[in-house]
Amino acid sequence: MIARIWRGTVRLENAEAYAAYIDGTGIAEYRRTPGNRLALMLRRDHGDRTEFITFTLWDSWESIRAFAGPDPEKAVYYPKDDAYLLDRAETVEHYEVTSASGLPVL
């Protein structure tokens, strides 16, 4: 199993709207992609900024490619992301899951 992690930062006043946008775009697409085991959106307010992390678990590199395209290291963005994001990383992080506890999806 492979964990995929994306990060982005928005202005605090845009956090609620962006959370709803992520839920309707990225999280929804994760859930529709065969091989996705788990999709979490994490949020942390810090001063006048809000950091978002999407943390997903996947069966294989093939399932990640089904979501992300031929280059699984490349971040996936949606049309309105630029209106919200203060920074835009072009890549994501991947980790092999070596053990897990308490996740019924495993």
Image (tube, rainbow, N blue to C red):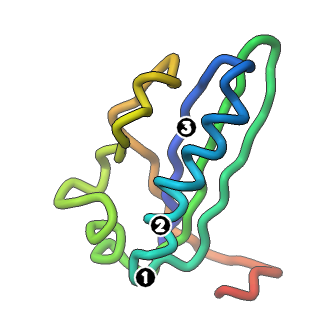
Q: Which residue is mark 3?
A: 7
Residue 55 location, x and y as percent? 60, 56
Q: Which mark is residue 35?
A: 1
Nearest to N terminus: mark 2 or mark 1 = 2
Q: Quadrant of residue 100?
A: bottom right
Q: CA distance from mark 2 to mark 3?
A: 15 Å
Q: Quadrant of residue 75?
A: top left
50 vs 98, nearest the viewer: 50
Sort mark 2 into few (<14), some (14-19) or many (20+) by Cα contacts within 10 Å: many
- Foreground tag (2 vs 1): 2
Amino acid type, residue under disc 3 in the picture: Arg
Sort mark 1 into few (<14), some (14-19) or many (20+) by Cα contacts within 10 Å: some
Nearest to N terminus: mark 2 or mark 3 = 3
Residue 70 location, x and y as percent? 17, 60
Amino acid type, residue under disc 2 in the picture: Tyr
In the image, what residue occupies the spot 80% across and 20% down? 46
Sort mark 3 into few (<14), some (14-19) or many (20+) by Cα contacts within 10 Å: some
Q: Which residue is mark 2?
A: 30
Q: Image height check: is 66 above or below 8?
A: below
In the image, what residue occupies the spot 75% across and 87% down? 104
Left or right of 84 in this view: 50: right
Disc 2 secondary structure class = helix
Amino acid type, residue under disc 1 in the picture: Gly
Q: Which mark is residue 90?
A: none
Disc 3 secondary structure class = strand
Disc 1 secondary structure class = loop
In the image, what residue occupies the spot 64% across and 46% down? 20
